[in-house]
Image: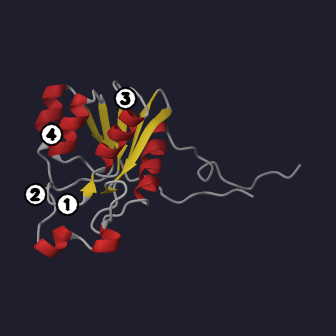
Amino acid sequence: MKKSTRSSKETKRPDWDEYFLKMAYLVAERSTCLRHHVGAVIARNKRILTTGYNGAASRVKDCLELGCMRNEKGIRSGERHEICRAIHAEQNAIIQAGLHGIDVSGSTIYCTHSPCILCAKMLVNARIKKFITSGEYIDKSFKPLFKEAGVDYETIALPRLAIKKLE
């Protein structure tokens, strides 16, 4: 039998938070937003419940086809969320749970960016217990809401995003 020459550092498995956050970055690749690719994974008990990415509503044209109306109107990031074709990644993850009858209460959401205040309100009402990210969004207004509602918030280091393929 051939002995592996890989070091233990090369074969280190990601911990669960890193694992699910890496998946959120993969989910973000489906985004149709021209400004931010955001992905979210909702998990509980080491199992994925739902995922979501930012993009236009189903069955309508998106920014890849029509262009970004926020760019056209000169709207800065973190402002006037209602002027946008996209539904946020966290919102889409919650919507998917509702469509498929999945209870997300008590779960953790892993997201590539911290939430806007609108998503934070939805996450509180969905009874998400923890939010983990590695990317800070410009809008910080969610922090007092999370604190009051008892939603734990954690920023971890950006995980290594390369996929290792063993032969």
The residue that label 1 is drawn on is: 84
Please provide percent x and percent y for residue 13. Answer: 57, 44
On screen, residue 40 above or below 75: above
Whole-angstrom CA distance, mark 2 to mark 3, is 28 Å
Residue contact at pointers 1 and 2, CB within 8 angstroms: yes
Whole-angstrom CA distance, mark 3 to mark 1, is 26 Å
Whole-angstrom CA distance, mark 4 to mark 3, is 21 Å
Lower position in the chain sequence, tag 1 or tag 4: 1
Which numbered disc, 2 or 4, marks the residue closer to the eye?
Answer: 2
Q: Amino acid at mark 4?
A: Lys
Which numbered disc, 1 or 4, marks the residue closer to the eye?
Answer: 1
- Please tell me whether mark 2 sits on a helix, a strand or a loop: loop
The residue that label 3 is drawn on is: 104
Whole-angstrom CA distance, mark 1 to mark 4, is 23 Å
Which numbered disc, 1 or 2, marks the residue closer to the eye?
Answer: 1
- Please tell me whether mark 3 sits on a helix, a strand or a loop: loop
Lower position in the chain sequence, tag 2 or tag 3: 2
Residue contact at pointers 3 and 1, CB within 8 angstroms: no
31 left or right, relative to 86: right
Lower position in the chain sequence, tag 4 or tag 3: 3
Lower position in the chain sequence, tag 2 or tag 4: 2
The residue that label 2 is drawn on is: 80
| Residue lying at 50% horizontally and 31% vertically, measured from the top left | 46
| Residue lying at 11% horizontally and 36% vertically, measured from the top left | 144
Please provide percent x and percent y for residue 76. Answer: 12, 66
77 left or right, relative to 38: left
- Please tell me whether mark 1 sits on a helix, a strand or a loop: loop
- Please tell me whether mark 4 sits on a helix, a strand or a loop: helix
Q: Amino acid at mark 3?
A: Val
